[in-house]
Every structure is written in structure tokens, then in C-alpha cells.
Image (cartoon, rainbow, N blue to C red):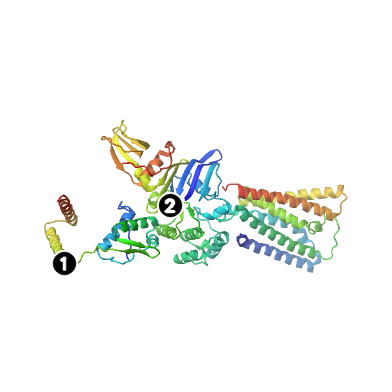
Amino acid sequence: MTWLAFRQHRVRMVTMALIVALWAGLAAVEHGFPGLRGISAGLFPYIPLVLGVFLGAPLVSREFERGTHQLAWTQSITRSRWFLPQTLVALALAVLTTAGTSALAWWSLGGLPWKREVNDTLYVLTGALPYAWAVFAVAIGVAWSAITRRTTVAMGASFFGVAATQLIAEGLRNRADRELDWPLTALQSAEAGVLTALAALLGVAAWWCTTRRDPA
Amino acid sequence: MTALEATGLGKRYGDKWALKDVFLTVPEGRIIALVGPNGAGKTTLMNLTVGLRRPTTGQIHVFGRPPYGESLQHVAFVAQEKPLYPEFTVAETLRLGERLNPRFDQPAARTRLDELGIPLKSKIRALSGGQRAQVAITLAVAKRAELIVLDEPLANLDPLARHEVMEGLMAAVADTGMTVLLSSHVIAELNDVCDHLILVSGGRVQVAGDIEDIVHRHRLLVGPAGTAPAGPYDVVSERTTERQSTLLVRMRGPIHDPRWTVRDLALEDVVLGYMRARDSVHLPPPTIAGTEDVA
Amino acid sequence: MIEFTLDRKSGTATYAQIVQQVEHALRAGLLTYGDQLPTAREVVARLAINPNTVLRAYRELEQRGLVEARPGLGTFVRRSLARPHNPRLEAGLLAWVSEARAAGLGPDDMRSLLESALTGHLRQADTA
């Protein structure tokens, strides 16, 4: 099943590699022309949107749309053993893409000091937080994928889901920063923790819909 | 050994029963035709058999086990659209089979595709409809399951491809002795192939049994209108003109009535009779036992 | 080795058609003692029919003592039905056919004549 999951993610692996390559180009330009600094870091919050839409949303629904669930789910394995490798490969790909792009964005900022503010671009670029966003975005994509069974609908729902969560998270973290006297790293960890917990819930929902619901 | 057993099996979608009160016992080694009008519940019964759907009521067993998880190695399935991953090559498709099935017979699958002249390096999307059907069926056969379920395997194929698909399937049966359940709404194409029949209509199993038995037990009775022939039988369907009644009956014993002509039927006539009757027929018992003799 | 063909419209059961074709081949001398019949797999791979049908036909031929199944090897002819070549009978029949044609009989008329002569003769033989 792991082989199948890797094989089915081949195109997405190439796509993600291209995104990282694009990011590298952008970061190199910023490095050469300090006046342009901050573009890749500023664009970084869009990465989770891409991950949710392109890695999460097609995962289950594409099988339904092509009827291949009737092939994949009638081999000698349980649907769980089909679902888990698929999700893990998507997550791994999301984490690798995040590692690449966040490191490049961070590097492009060069000598700029972190202002240690919640609004600073570096807040979402460092620590566990970017990875938590990646995992959350994929999870919301997979959940919508398994619930709606329609890739386009799942893509739209994941896009708005991730965007809305980002807005809410921004509001909450500003408020928490004002009302609680926590160091920013603790705030980052708390946000990452909440996102990971949400991702886990979404993952269970997606797993339940895939393995327990009858196919349409 | 029983290949397929359903007890009180039912499936409901929303508030509509797609299949209800199904009791079936199909012995091993049969080639079973699942026939019935479109929307009768054939695909639902097949999906329940291969574990894609779960029953609303009752149970289904394939070789004594419910068809989920590990037990899926005992049943192979080819859906009507013959779904395969279009971006895979033929070789990758076989690899999928090998990775996901403990008993997968890769050499046999390669030999078969070689016989058919389907190159392993081709992408699935580059194959013709007939070739894709062959790959899908080869994949399912190579799983070495005891039961193979094929939903309308011949639909959308040209006559030559139909013949080739059946040849390959029957050769595989000769090699492995597997039980085959295949659906079709064209009865003529099943005549030389199947030896067992399950007739579904209106969500119910109307007849199930060995084809010879079924044919042997049904007769066409033609006689004067307004009378009924003497003898033990159940009427499946009936047509009456002013003077003449034509009854398709299931015999329970010999019929001796000089006013009525008793005619033998071909399988197709029996099936059509049940299909015409639709859900007006609820003859107990739904399964034909096949031991007692009728005239 | 012989090859079977199917007449799907004849109404004769498939297994019976196979039995008939083997018997015919035995009579015509196409099959003789020791010859092997095609395996069930070979037959179904050509005709796309149920393997059990072939096995059933072979069982019937075995019961008639015409063939025998050797496990693991195949099914072999045990007895030939070929009659020794009889040129006198053949010449007589040919003469009869040309006489019938001269009398204005078509092939179907001749066939039905032969048919009724056969049944009449056989019935006489039975009652005798």
C-alpha cells in the first residue's frame, strides 16, 4: 500500500518540488537585491492553502470520481490500510515542502532581526508552527475530500477553511498576546498544539468517512 | 463448500429498499448469472458481496466469512466501468495487484497479457476499451480469489472483445476452479457460460438455482380463457386474450389437463416471464431446491 | 487433435454438441484409438463456454466407453467407430443420388427419403 501511495503522489511530489524550486529562485533574488526582501516570507502564509487544496482535497474524492475506489478497496487490504499510507505520504510531502519554503523564506530575510512580535512575518515562519499549519491544512483537505467526495468542492472548502482559520488564529494570537504575559515561543507552541489537535480530529473524521461510510 | 450465502440480506438507500429479504446459497464452482432489469438491485448485491457496501439488514458470507478486511483475499471484483489508474502503466497496474494481494499470480497475469498482445509498458489511458477490460479482468483473476465478481463484464465491448473476454475468463475457471458471479441484462450471452442463475427484480431475488433445474421446473401452459389447469403449480406471469390464457408456471408436480397444452421453455423465456411479472411475484420459497422431480 | 465448433442457434445443448462431434469424428476416422481429445482449457479458451460443459461431455463419452480420462494426462480415445471403407456401398449410394436427381428430387427431398427409409428400417428391425 505504501508503494501505491507513493506512486499516486508522484505528480504531486514533482509539483511540490517545483514550488520549492520557485521559492529558492525568489529567495535568491531577494538575497541579491535587499530592497525586495520580505516577498517570499510575506507569501509564506499562502503555502498551507496550497497544501490543503492540492495535497489534501484530492486524496479520497479523486478515487470516487474515477471509480477507482472500487479497485483500491477490493484488494486484500482493509480501507484503513489503504487510507493511512495515503494520508501519511501527503503529510510527509506537506512537511517537506514547508521545511523547504520556510527555510528559504527565513534565509531570504538575511540579517533582518526578528522583532519578537506576533505580527512579525517570522512568527509563522519559525518553530513548530509552520509544520502545524501544514498538517492542519492537509487534514482539513482530506476531511473535506472524504466528506464531500467531490474534488472541486473539497478544494474550495479547504481553501476557505484554511483561510478562515488563519484569520481566526491571527485574531486569537493578538488577543492572547495582549491579555496573557506569555513569551512568543510559548504562544507559538500553544497555537501549534491547538492546530495539531484540530488536525487529529479532522483526520479521524476523514478516516471514519472513508472506512465506515458506504461509497456512493 | 458454499461460495456465497446471504441470510435476510437487505440494503436501504434513504427510505428506498434496493434489496430486501435476500436468502441465497450458492455452491462452490458454479458460474452464476445475475440477471434482472436495470435498477433491480444487481449492482447492490455485487457491492455487498465484495464488501464495498455494508448490509442494512442480514448478513452475507463469502466462503464462510464476511467480505471485509483480510477476507477480501477470497473475493475479486471487476466493476462495470473497469476502473484502473489511467496514469499507471500496465506493469505498474500488475505491481499494484502484487503489492495489495498475498496470493497474486504475477507470472500468470503477464503470460495472459502477452497472449492478448497488451504491452506491459503501455499506459492504461492509451489502451482501447477492450484492452482495458482485459487488464482489469486479468488483474482480478490473478488475485487467485475463490470467487470472482464481475459487474456487466461485456458491456460496452465489441463482439470480438466480448468473445476474448469470455474465453480468457473461462480458461481461468478451467485453470483455477474458481466460482464466478457475473451480471448481465443480455441473457443470450450467458447461455453457454453460466450454470447457475440468480434473478433479481424489484429488489428481490425471484429465482435462484441451477439453470437446468430452473428450466426443468417451468412450463408454458396454454388453454381456454376463464379456466385454470388442474395440478400443483405457481403462476409466474399470465396473459389472457378473449379465448385463450397463457400461463408461465413453476411446477410443483405433474399437470394432467387435456384442455391445456404444456410447453417446454428456454431459459430466456423463463427469465423474461419473471421480469414481466416484476414485483407482483412473491413465490415461496425463493430458492429452487432441485431434488424432487416434476413431470 | 480435433477442434469443436458450436452452433448456438441449434437448440441442442452445448455438451450434446460436443458429444456428437466426437462421435462423428470417431465414425469418420478423424479420431482413432489412443488419440487425445483437447483439454477442457483448450476448448473453453476457444469457444468461451463453461468448462463444466466440456467435462460433462467427456464424462458422457467415457460412460459410453468411447474415451477414457487419464488423470494428469488428458482424455484419450478408447474405441474407434470408424467402419472399414466400403466402395461398393458408396458407389450404390452415388448411383441412387443421380437417379433421384434425374427424377427431379432436391437435396432436402433426398434427405427426407433417406431419413424415413432409415426409421422404417430400424423400426422393422426393432420389432423383428
Q: Which mark is residue B11?
A: none
User: Does the image show residue A119?
Assistant: yes
Whether tag 2 and tag 1 are in contact, CB under 8 A, the answer is: no
Report which residue position mark 1 lands on.
C87
Judge from the rendering whether residue C18 lies leftward or rightward of residue B35; answer left or right: left
Residue B293: give x, y in percent of width and height: 34, 42
Three-letter code for the amino acid on which mark 1 is drawn: Pro
Residue B34: give x, y in percent of width and height: 44, 48
User: Does the image show residue B87?
Assistant: no
Identified at 56% across, 40% down, the residue is: B14
- Foreground of the two, C47 or A35: C47
How many marks on residues? 2
Callout 2: residue from which chain?
B
Seen as rendered, the residue at the extreme top is B226
Callout 1: residue from which chain?
C
Image quarter of the N terminus of chain C: bottom left
Three-letter code for the amino acid on which mark 2 is drawn: Arg
- Foreground of the two, B246 or B23: B23
Check disc 2 and report its element: helix, strand or loop: loop
Residue A45: give x, y in percent of width and height: 75, 56
Mark 2–mark 1 Cα distance, whole angstroms, equals: 50 Å
- Foreground of the two, B51 or A133: B51
Judge from the rendering whether residue A13 lies leftward or rightward of residue B211; answer left or right: right
Report which residue position mark 2 lands on.
B30
Q: Quadrant of residue A108?
A: bottom right
Residue C125: give x, y in percent of width and height: 16, 53
Depicted B78 relative to depicted B254: above or below: below
Both labels 2 and 1 in a single chain: no
